[in-house]
Image (cartoon, helix red, strand yellow):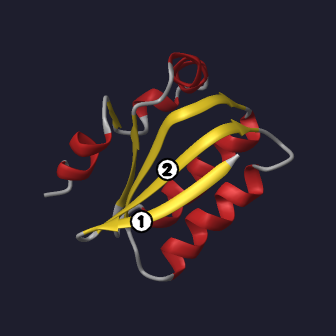
Amino acid sequence: MNVNVSKDNKTTLIEVSGRIDSTNANQLGEALMSEINQGNMQLVVDLGSVDYMSSAGLREIVSALKKVRGKGDLRLAQPSERVLEVLEMAGLDTIFQIFPDQSLAISSYS
């Protein structure tokens, strides 16, 4: 799994690629918490290059969402079909704002 963090105005973009499972989900959690702890509360997590996400990965993004709630938001961009199925099965598609691409997710904060 790779995590790349960049800024677009006031929004922090976190691009994730590869598999997110119990062996590396904490890396995603650390990247998210690092941004939140720096005061970055408008987060977009791009899951377009993630081919698998386990419950450990879901736990990390839910935890980050809880942390920013009330001060900002965490939005998801272009999850693969397989990842979207996992989000739907867990009922998280109703909790997260999910966008078909990165630019729509980022511009939704304006």
Mark found first going from the N terminus, 1 or 2: 1
Of residue 41 and residue 104, the one placed in the foreground of this image is 104
Rendered location of residue 36, percent (x, y): 49, 73
Disc 1 and disc 2 in contact, CB within 8 angstroms: yes
Residue 27's place in the image compared with 57, above or below, is below
Rendered location of residue 18, percent (x, y): 67, 37
Q: Residue at x 50, y 73 (%)?
A: 35
Q: Which image quadrant is residue 4 in?
A: bottom right
Question: Hey, which residue is sitting farthest left in the picture?
Answer: 110
Q: Disc 2 residue type? A: Glu
Question: Hey, which residue is sitting farthest right in the picture?
Answer: 23
Q: Is residue 81 left or right of residue 96?
A: right
Q: Disc 1 residue type? A: Ser
* Separation (CA) of disc 1 from disc 2: 8 Å
Q: Which residue is mark 2?
A: 15
Rendered location of residue 55, percent (x, y): 73, 35
Q: Which residue is mark 1?
A: 6
